Image: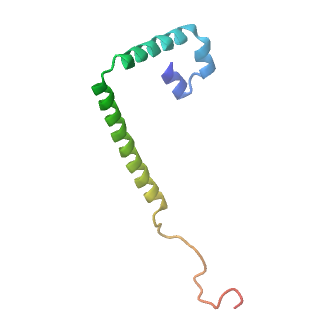
């Protein structure tokens, strides 16, 4: 279902109308809730650390991409190459 929605082959409305999809979604949400409730403090801390590392890595990648986009470009034309006395001549 999720792959169908994400790929555009299925709309969210179609998924909601399909009882099998909604049942599967509900079952999966129940599994996720139970897993979260049974986590130890050590598990939660490990998950938090993994999330922070991922966020830090992603932020670095975004900064690098932004720097590449904003960096100097070659062959830019920014004005007249004539050496004059300004717009009044």
Q: Residue 9: name its quadrant.
A: top right
Q: Residue at x 48, y 61 (%)?
A: 70
Residue 68 screen position, x and y as percent: 43, 58
| Left or right: 9, with 44 as reference point | right
> Is 41 situated above or below 77?
above
The image's colour scheme reads rainbow
Direction front: furthest residue: 41
Q: Residue at x 45, y 63 (%)?
A: 71
Q: Residue at x 39, y 41 (%)?
A: 55
Residue 4 screen position, x and y as percent: 52, 22
| Left or right: 39, with 70 as reference point | left
> Is 72 situated above or below 17?
below
**Location of the C terminus (image quadrant):** bottom right
| Total number of numbered discs in the rendering | 0
| Left or right: 56, with 73 as reference point | left
Direction left: furthest residue: 42
Q: Residue 34: name its quadrant.
A: top left
Residue 17 screen position, x and y as percent: 62, 12
Q: Return the residue nearer the eye: 61 or 54.
A: 54
Q: Return the residue nearer the eye: 75 or 51.
A: 51
> Is 10 situated above or below 75?
above
Residue 74 screen position, x and y as percent: 47, 69
């Amino acid at each position: 279902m999720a792959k169908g929605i994400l790929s555009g082959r299925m709309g969210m409305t179609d998924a909601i109308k399909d009882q099998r999809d909604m049942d599967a979604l509900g079952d999966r949400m129940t599994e996720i809730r139970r897993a979260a409730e049974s986590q130890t403090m050590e598990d939660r801390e490990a998950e938090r650390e993994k999330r922070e590392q991922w966020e830090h890595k992603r932020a670095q990648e975004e900064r690098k991409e932004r720097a590449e986009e904003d960096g100097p470009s070659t062959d830019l034309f920014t004005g007249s190459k004539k050496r004059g006395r300004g717009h009044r001549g």
